[in-house]
Image: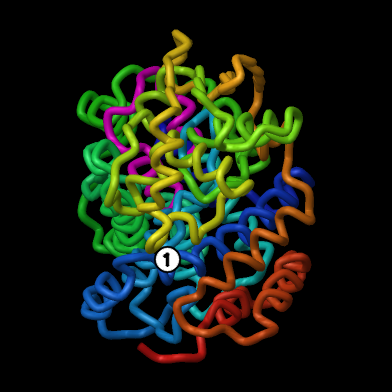
Amino acid sequence: MTAAERFAAHALQTRFEDLSLPAVEAAKIFILDSLGVGVAGSSADGADGLLAVARTWGAEPLAQVWGRSMRLSAPAAAFMNGWQMHNQEYDCLHEGAVVHALASVLPAALAAAEASGGCGGRNLITAVAVGADIAAGLGLASRAGFRFFRPATAGGFGAVAAAGRILGLDQARMEAAFAWQLAQASGTMQAHREGSPILAAQIGFNARAALQSCELSLVGLAPPRQVFEGSDGYFSMFEGGFDLQPVLRDLGRVWRIAEFSHKPYPAGRATHGGIEGALALRKAHGFTADDVAEIVVSAPPLIVRLVGRPPIINANPSYARLCLAFAVATALRKDAVDISDFRDTALNDAATLALAARVRLQDDGNPDPNALAPQSVSVSLTKGKSVDWRCETMLANPKRPLSRLCQLKKIYRCMEFSADALKSSSAEALISSIDGLEDLADVRVLTNETSGSASI
């Protein structure tokens, strides 16, 4: 049996009753988190321009753009919502896989539900869970470092699983949809390397492709069968070394959605150890930003690769969010890291840039090419004292989960950044609907609660 056959069977045969209670609760938590983050992304730099283009992609306005008073074709809405979810680096992820799966899975699933006349909350929870299994599973199976932008490439296959389930594909059509997704999979690391906002668009492209792959699966053209393990399949082309057997063995036994991490700060996950460590040391020792002579963050090589770029003046928001030095300096200067810290004049704050120049990131020699932890922070003070902090697991990992209060505080703050004004009750209504998602008759209620009231 091929991997595509196994993944298709998992996506279609899993019942809501098969999910563990932690998986159901995690799915609800991250559906809420993802919708909030996606709403906030609607007002990010470049959103209006992308929306103007996406409006031309298809005539039927079936699916809601979160944080907007506008509906687009299902593939176009999946693109916009996927981009919005990831454009602030605030969306959840599976750390072991290094995959932000829900940024493609949830936009595709909800767009599929809207295009097909709605679905129940239990179906959405199950679709998100199986989509997360497949997207994260592809990352976990890799034995190599990033070659392509894995959150986009792997995430697209999870999106196919989630959308295809909601659209009612059968086994053969789901296998074909995976093949069509391979034909469309895309996303290089060059945008990440240069800090380009096109990075998040790559997730949007794969979410859009997932809807198209499901549609194309109905055409009946004979698809390649070894989509993932073939000599020119997904792993050979996009990853390199891999071992799929443990992932396939765990399908239906280990629910990856329960292994996902929140992002407590709106910056690349790879910056979060440095941010937390700097804030913890200041709280413990009472120093100010002006007391800092140097900060050294020691972390695995993937951290250095992802966020080791130098702080620069006139950086665009995407560059700054992926610059550990700027994120750590922002945290110490403001005692927090907020969405607003990566917009407008905050990016060129002279005092923040001066402190960022005193932050150094060094490779700790970790042999795991996908490791994000452990991390340590050492702060040398101007008076000669040095203080140190270390974490084995970053904050908001399932082993150190965010409190319910912190989760909701994040949602309320995100909803304030909607491009179009939301109803005053939108945040409370969305939270209430997702708290009772198992009993929700039609998930289109969720997207209605992200709809803005103003026009652009």
Q: Is residue 449 magenta?
A: no
Q: Quadrant of the C terminus?
A: bottom left
Please name the amino acid that badge 1 sits on: Asn
- Residue 351 or residue 92, whichever sits in front: 351
Does residue 248 appear anywhere in the picture?
Answer: no
- Residue 300 or residue 115, whichever sits in front: 300
Residue 436 vertical position relative to residue 348 in the rendered view, above or below = below
At mark 1, the secondary structure is helix
Residue 307 placement (x, y as % from top left): 39, 33
Please name the residue shown 49% across and 64% down the image. Answer: 38
Please name the residue shown 26% across and 53% down the image. Answer: 198
Q: Quadrant of the N terminus?
A: top left
* Chief SS of the magenta region: helix
Please name the residue shown 44% across and 8% down the image. Answer: 365
- Residue 430 or residue 215, whichever sits in front: 430
Quadrant housing residue 20:
top right
Does residue 410 appear anywhere in the picture?
Answer: yes
Residue 53 placement (x, y as % from top left): 22, 74
Query: To which residue does mark 1 refer?
Result: 81
Residue 314 vertical position relative to residue 340 in the rendered view, above or below = above
Q: How many marks are shown on the rendered structure?
A: 1
Q: Residues within 10 Å of mark 1 (few under 14, many from 20)?
A: many
Span of residues in magenta: 136-159
Residue 290 vertical position relative to residue 301 in the rendered view, above or below = below
Residue 262 placement (x, y as % from top left): 62, 45
Q: Residue furthest front?
A: 383
- Residue 255 or residue 216, whichever sits in front: 255
Quadrant housing residue 399:
top right
Residue 372 placement (x, y as % from top left): 51, 25
Please name the residue shown 65% across and 26% down the image. Answer: 393
